[in-house]
Image (cartoon, rainbow, N blue to C red):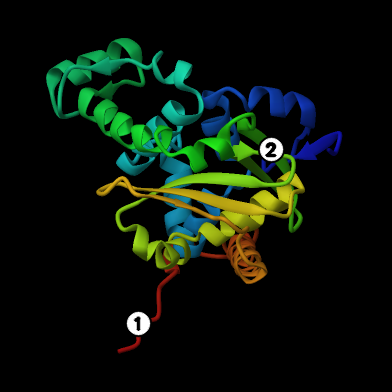
Amino acid sequence: IMKEIKLLDGKFYDTKELLSKMLDDDFYYGFMHKFAFSSSSIKLLLESPKTYHNVMTYSQNEKQSQALRDGFLLHLLVLTPDYFHKQIFVDVQSKNTNKFRLAQEEHGEVYTIKEKEDAERLADAVFRNEPAMQIIKGAKVEFPGVGVVQGKPFRAKADVLRDDCIIDLKTTSNIKQFEKAANWYHYDVQAYLYTEIFGIKNFKFIVIDKKSCDIGISTKPVSDDFISSGRDKVRYAMRVYKDYFETEETDLDSYYIDIKL
């Protein structure tokens, strides 16, 4: 681990101190969201520089979409159940109620009973799956990492970290289409970045189908081609960042996508 790391604000930070603070979700999804790249920010840059700009400018915290809220709760329940039970759940089915809004005003981050029940249904499928539980048992969970990849600061939080492997917990709407989804959602970017940041070559997935509750497990690490694909995407995203955010004369408002029919 390097002693210091330069973040996107141009300042140097003690790496061990950063890693300690990154155990706190507010710091990880707040401060580090702004001043270090992640697989999520790379996905935004791959979509478009305007998408990246808008999210980074107007979103103070990363955990805002419903998919991220659902994934966050599932990860808590499977990996750190004590923390899951400390969350505040409001007895409503929808977030569009006065009761929910009042709870938000009082407590900040709150969740609905429906969100809780959805997480419990999926987590139960994992808990009942012995091969999946054997992978998780005894490993480090929700373990933060920070490092320099392709000359830029990156952050990561490994769902499951073993001495010889990184395992990521994913949900899918169709487990039989997960291979396509992995490319569409740029999971190759995450695999590449995590293997670089944590210095561990092997990356695997545990996947839960949100409809059937079927479990998918990578019995072998993802391929070298999958990792290489992620590396190429990060390289492209870094070019986009350089062209639109490190060059003063670039006019982001003039950015357009060439449509060919």
CB atoms at circles 2 and 1 under 8 Å apart? no
106 or 93: nearer the viewer: 93
Visible in this render: residue 48?
no
Q: Nearer the viewer, residue 141 or 20?
A: 141
Q: Which mark is residue 259?
A: 1
Residue 25 picture location, percent across and down: 53, 26
10 Å neighbourhood of mark 1: few (<14), some, or many (≥20)? few
Residue in view at x 13 percent, y 24 percent:
97
Element assignment for label 1: loop
Q: Residues within 10 Å of mark 2 (few under 14, many from 20)?
A: many
Q: Which residue is mark 2?
A: 145
Give above or below for 246 relative to 91: below
Structural distance between the alpha carbons of marks 2 and 1:
39 Å
Residue 96 appears at what percent x and percent y?
15, 29
Which residue shows up at 64% across the image and 41% down it?
155
- Quadrant in the picture for the C terminus: bottom left
Residue 6 in the image: state x and y as whole percent.
77, 40
Q: Name which of mark 2 and mark 1 comes first in the sequence.
A: 2
Q: Is residue 261 above or below residue 205?
A: below
Q: Work out which residue is located at the far top of the displayed protein and give it.
A: 106
Instruction: Give whichever of 130, 119 is nearer the camera.
Output: 130
Q: Residue furthest front?
A: 130
Give me the residue at 44% from left, 69% from top: 255
Image position of 113 (left or right of 149):
left
